Amino acid sequence: MKKPIVKRILIAFFLVVLLTVWLFAAFGPNKETMVDEDVFEKIYKSPCAKFESLREKDKAVGPIIIDSSIRTLSGFVSTLPLKECNDDIGDVVYRITFNCKEKCGDMDEIVVLVGKNAVSINGVVYGAETKLAYKEIKDIFDSKWDCFSK
């Protein structure tokens, strides 16, 4: 008499597992519905960066690899009050490569170009609400460079 009960329980268990797999396959996450991590989140989580000044007066300093104090830079860049725009970034003053190959190996690099008029992150241009606000942002990049290059 116990065999039919055990058999029914096993069949019921099998059906529940089968139904769960089917529901997950039909309604579970897939590449189209999963939200890709925002580039600013990726910058914040970056473990290292290469900071380069393209100004003539800074050429002798060369690129600076940042790892232990990365949050000083990544935290600032990831919270910039920027919006996507079609502005010309102007002459590039700084290049910051987050997840740089020199220190982070095979991680996907994120290239931030700081121009005189706007910022480009992996080819997407971002600007501030006003020219005055962007000047203040650029001034902070200047102070970050001064801090790391000493």
Image (cartoon, helix red, strand yellow):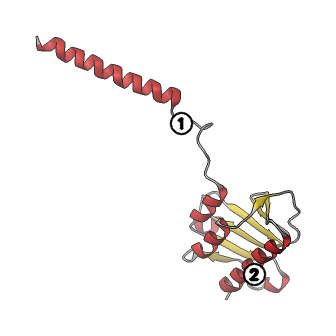
x 17%, y 15%: residue: 5
Which disc number belongs to residue 108?
A: none
Q: CA distance from mark 2 to mark 1?
A: 43 Å
Which of the 4 quarters of the picture holds residue 92? bottom right
Answer with left or right where residue 4 lies relative to residue 62: left
Choose the circle earlier in sequence order: 2 or 1: 1
Q: Within 10 angstroms of label 1, few (less than 14), some, or many (20 or more) residues?
A: few
Q: Amino acid at mark 2?
A: Asp
Q: Amino acid at mark 1?
A: Pro
x 43%, y 27%: residue: 21
Observer-nearest residue: 127 or 20? 127
At which x and y percent is residue 40? Answer: 65, 60
- Location of mark 1 (residue): 29
Label 1: state its secondary structure: loop
Label 2: state its secondary structure: helix
x 73%, y 65%: residue: 112
- Location of mark 2 (residue): 142
Q: Within 10 angstroms of label 2, few (less than 14), some, or many (20 or more) residues?
A: some
The answer to whether the residues at label 2 and label 1 have Cβ atoms under 8 Å apart is: no
Which of the 4 quarters of the picture holds residue 50? bottom right
The outermost residue toward the bottom is: 150
From what the image shows, is residue 81 above or below residue 65?
Answer: above
At which x and y percent is residue 76? Answer: 65, 72
Answer with left or right where residue 6 lies relative to residue 109: left
At which x and y percent is residue 73? Answer: 64, 74
Which of the 4 quarters of the picture holds residue 99? bottom right
At which x and y percent is residue 3? Answer: 15, 13
Count up the numbered dots. 2
